[in-house]
Amino acid sequence: MKEYKLIVRISNPKILIVDDLPENIEIIRQILEDSDNSGYDFFIANNGIKALELLEKVSPDLILLDVMMPGMNGFEVAKRVKADPKTRLIPIIMITALESREDRIKGLEAGVDDFITKPVNIIELRARVKNLIKLRESINELEQAEQVIFSLARAVEAKDKYTEGHCGRLSTMAEALGRKLQLSEQDLKILNRGGILHDIGKISIPDSILLKNGPLTPEEFEEIKMHPEMGERICAPLKTLQPVIPAIKYHQERWDGSGYPEGLKGDQIPLHARIIGIVDIFDALTSDRPYRKAMSEENAYEIIKEETTEGKWDPDIVDAFLEMMSSYRNKQIMV
C-alpha cells in the first residue's frame, strides 16, 4: 500500500479512511484534498482490525468505511465503534457498492450515520463529509462545555479536604442503588452524573461559610440553601444536562416537605433526587467534617431509619438502600 506522509495540525479535522483497496483510498483522498474544504488530516487502515487499533490512537472526527473487507467487514467495525462510549459519537459514512434495502438497514442497525454508493459521486462525497465534520465539531464543543462543568464540580469538592471524594462516592453509590431498583440505563446515567454535579452550585457560596469550622448561623444556612438552584442555573445552558437538572435542584428536598428549595413532598420529588438525597446523607454522616468526626456505618443506618420513621425519606428507597448496603457488607465479610 502507498505510504502517505501526514502533516498533522491540531486544528485540522481528522478523517480515517478504511478500505482494503489502495486505489479506492487514493480516489477518496484526492477528491477531498482538491475540494474547497481542504485541510483534512488523513489516516489510513486497510482492514477492520487496523482501523480499530488506529481509532484508539487517532480519535478521528469522521470515519469513511468500506463494507467488503477481508476478516472483519464494515458492519462489524461500525458496531464496535458505536458500542464503545469513547467512540460512539464519531460519525461514520459507509462507502459501498451494496445497494439493497437489507444492506442499508444492516448498516443503520450497526450505527452508520450516512451512506455513499460506489462509484463515488465527487460532489456528494464532499458535501456529506463537510456536513458530518460540522456535526462532529458541534459535538466536540458540547463535550468540552460539559467537561468544564464537571471540572467546576470537582473544583468545589477540592476546596474542602473533608469532602474530597464525596462526589465520586455519591455517583457510584447512586448508580448502584439505581441498579438495585432496576432502573433503566438512561436513569443510571442520570444518577451517575447527578452524583458528580449535585453540589456544583456551592461554587457560589463564600469559603467563609462553606468551610466554616462550626455550626452555621441562620443567615449562613440561607445562603447554603441557594446552592441547588445555583446548580440548576449553571447546568441549564447545556441541553445534554437537562435530564440531570431535577436531581441537582431537588436533592435537598425531603419526603415530608421539610426540605428545600421548594418544599416538595412525597412523589413530587423526582426519583433521581430522592435516590441522591439518601446516598448524600449517608456519605455525609460517615465522613469527617470540621465540626465532628465520621460516625460508623451502623450509626448512620440507625439515623436514616429513625428519620424515615419521622417522614424525611422515601421508605421504599431507604429499604432498597439498606438491603443493598447489607448485601455489599456481607460480600466483603465473605471475601
Image (cartoon, helix red, strand yellow):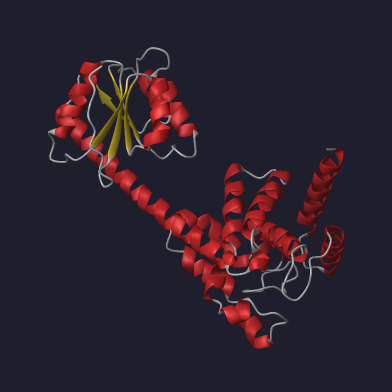
Residue at 69% over, 73% down:
259
Is residue 280 positioned above or below 256 on the image? above
Relative to 207, is 117 on the left or the right?
A: left
Residue 120 visible at all: no
Quadrant of the frame with the N terminus: top left
Residue 38 visible at all: yes
Is residue 334 positioned above or below 144 on the image? above
Residue 174 at what x, y percent from top left? Answer: 67, 53
Residue 213 at what x, y percent from top left? Answer: 70, 79
The residue lying furthest to the top in this view is: 70
**Residue 52: which quarter of the image?**
top left
In the image, 256 versus 16, the foreground residue is 16
Residue 318 at what x, y percent from top left? Answer: 79, 56
Relative to 230, is 274 on the left or the right?
A: right
Residue at 53% over, 71% down:
203
**Residue 27: which quarter of the image?**
top left
Relative to 194, is 138 on the left or the right?
A: left
Q: How many marks?
A: 0
Residue 35 at what x, y percent from top left? Answer: 13, 36
**Residue 29: which quarter of the image?**
top left
Quadrant of the frame with the C terminus: top right
Residue at 36% over, 15% down:
69
Is residue 293 positioned above or below 240 on the image? below
Is residue 275 positioned above or below 37 on the image? below
